[in-house]
Image: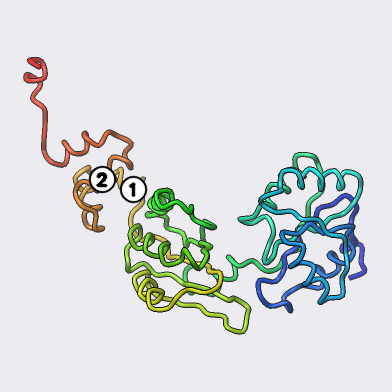
Amino acid sequence: MTDKKNRIQKGTLYLVATPIGNLADLSPRALKVLGEVDFVAAEDTRNTGKMLSLFEISRPMVPYHEHNRMSAGEDICGRLIRGESCALVTDAGTPAVSDPGEDLVRLCVDRGIPVTSVPGCCAAINALTLSGLPTGRFSFEGFLPSQAGARAKALDDLKLERRTMIFHEAPHRLLQTLSDMRDAFGGDRRLAVCREMTKLNEEVLRMTIDQAVQHFEASAPRGEFVLVVAGSTQRDAETLNTISVEDHFNFYIKTGLDRKEAVKAVARDRKVPKNDIYMAVMGIREDPSRQKED
């Protein structure tokens, strides 16, 4: 750890991944950086302070989180420009992933401030590798919107996503999110529900969405969750647009939509008015001579 490659560089922002549950996962390089930078920017200075004290590290700390990211980001950039080095950490996992740290990285990039990463724990990747689902291509979706309508719209947009999808969710919203996923994806879609990862009570439930809903209706969710959901095996909208309107309509009927919702789905895919699809599917054609009379 004494070679030039691992020497702390002045005026540099270090993105330091921290454990998501097991403190033994903190890497030697992360310990070196945390112990040698000029200051640490932390999501919660109390939590980070406790972690650092366990490793007998004492560094000046400043808070950087969702509620102060604008003002704190400017202050941190100012110190970096003046030649100080900074380690950015979250409470757990990799900073700047579904995290206000992305704004700080953008500020630094815009101002020509060097940014480097000290890789390590990431809850999303950890869950993906445990899921038993395809890992070659995946989509990280983070937290879904808290508003019911926006959440339903977000899931509807992902209905035909072929890649494995990764979501974060809090315990108090888990059951509602699973219910919304069942409405959007169908109850037989496979998923892995991951909690307490890297901890003594690590749990990974590999089941269908229907089974997950039933499980958490009977057992109250506890802890933070990562949901890994199988991608769709249905044909995507681009492919559907190459078949007839009638076949496109029947495709959605077979997925469980009623006639009205199927018409709306076809119209959305083809970017045409709903009435055009309705007339095509129902065999309704306007009489040109009647249009002239009207």
* Residue displayed at 81% across by 56% down: 62
Front residue (pair 245, 37) = 37
| Residue on which the image places disc 2 | 243
The image shows residue 136 at horizontal and vertical percentages of 52, 64
Query: Image check: 33 left or right of 120?
Result: right
The image shows residue 183 at horizontal and vertical percentages of 33, 59
Q: Badge 2 local density, few (<14 within 10 Å), some, or many (20+)? A: few
* Residue displayed at 39% across by 70% down: 190
The image shows residue 73 at horizontal and vertical percentages of 76, 46
* Residue displayed at 38% across by 55% down: 159
Q: State the colouring used for the structure image.
A: rainbow
Instruction: Answer above or below: position of 199 versus 156.
Output: below
Front residue (pair 222, 99) = 222
Identity, as a three-letter code, of the amino acid under mark 1: Thr
> Which residue is the extreme one toward the bottom?
200
Where disc 1 sits, the SS reads helix
Query: Image check: 89 left or right of 80?
Result: left
In the figure, residue 60 lies in which quadrant?
A: bottom right
In the figure, residue 284 lies in which quadrant?
A: top left
Front residue (pair 2, 185) = 185
Where disc 2 sits, the SS reads loop
Q: Badge 1 local density, few (<14 within 10 Å), some, or many (20+)? A: few
| Residue on which the image places disc 1 | 239
Numbered tag placed on residue 137 in the rendering: none
What quarter of the picture does the C terminus occupy? top left
Q: Could you tell me if the residues under marks 2 and 1 are in contact, i.e. CB atoms within 8 Å?
A: yes
The image shows residue 61 at horizontal and vertical percentages of 83, 59
